[in-house]
Amino acid sequence: MRSAKAVFLKQWRDTLKNRMILLQFMMMPILAFIMTELVAKPSGDIPDGMFVMMFAAMFVGMAPLTTTAGAIAEDRERKSLRFLVMAGVKQHEYLLGVGGFVLLVCSVVSVLMGLISGYHSMELVKFILLMILGSATSILLGAAIGIFSKNQQTATAISVPVFMVFAFFPMIAQFNETVEKAASILYTQQINAMIYDLSGPGVKPMLIIIANLAAFVVLFALAYKKKGLRG
């Protein structure tokens, strides 16, 4: 656990130095806050939480995925992993450190977005848990992409079209029935549906989310078996 903590702190320092990563995490809550305060609240026809609901699935499908993929690919490209292994860091400790940091930041953003939306008590808890579950799913997918990528440029080339599908399909699905049917197998689409109706039944959407999570676990295992974390 000490090694995982060291990787966690390393990722913290790397993120603070990279404004683009910080922007990825802060862009959605900032947009949600601005649109809520300037558009939703002054209007009597738009629910206060409308824009948070719109941006929540987009955040889950983009920020944790691209950040994890980029972080792992960057360490591979810079040969940082080789030095970490020489220092005694185990592979699972490295992944726990990187993924744990990204999940922590996503959790903070989830709380902020939940508060912006005006959720209270159990609705707020359910919203945060859904966001954390979705973020963990994206982190696994991002980790698999990062392992498959030999450098950061490759990771970006792979992750951009992937996150566009997972981040933007739920929004497009609100206006197109064909896209809605196609997107129904995506975890971000189900998270989006559950957030829009936090009091509704969630068994089927949750099963789809878990199926996505399991699929990404398998994908990660295959990537790990083929590539490992060789620097």
Image (tube, rainbow, N blue to C red):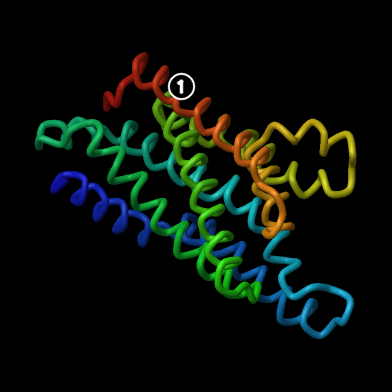
At x 57%, y 30%, the residue is 211
- Where is the N terminus found, in terms of image quarters? top left
Q: Pointer 1: what residue?
A: 218
Location of residue 192 in the rendering, given as x and y in whole percent from the top left corner: 69, 50
Vertical placement of residue 107 versus 3, above or below: below
Nearer to the camera, 32 or 120 = 120
In this image, 107 relative to 40: left or right?
left
Nearer to the camera, 148 or 176 = 176
The secondary structure type at the circle numbered 1 is helix
In this image, 228 relative to 196: left or right?
left
Location of residue 129 in the rendering, given as x and y in whole percent from the top left corner: 51, 55
In this image, 61 relative to 98: left or right?
right
At x 61%, y 41%, the residue is 206
Location of residue 225 in the rendering, given as x and y in whole percent from the top left corner: 34, 16
Q: Residue furthest top?
A: 226
Callout 1 environment at 10 Å: few (<14), some (14 to 19), or many (20+)?
some
Vertical placement of residue 63 versus 180, above or below: below
At x 89%, y 42%, the residue is 176
Nearer to the camera, 150 or 170 = 170
Location of residue 133 in the rendering, given as x and y in whole percent from the top left corner: 50, 47
**Quadrant in which residue 16 is drawn:** bottom left
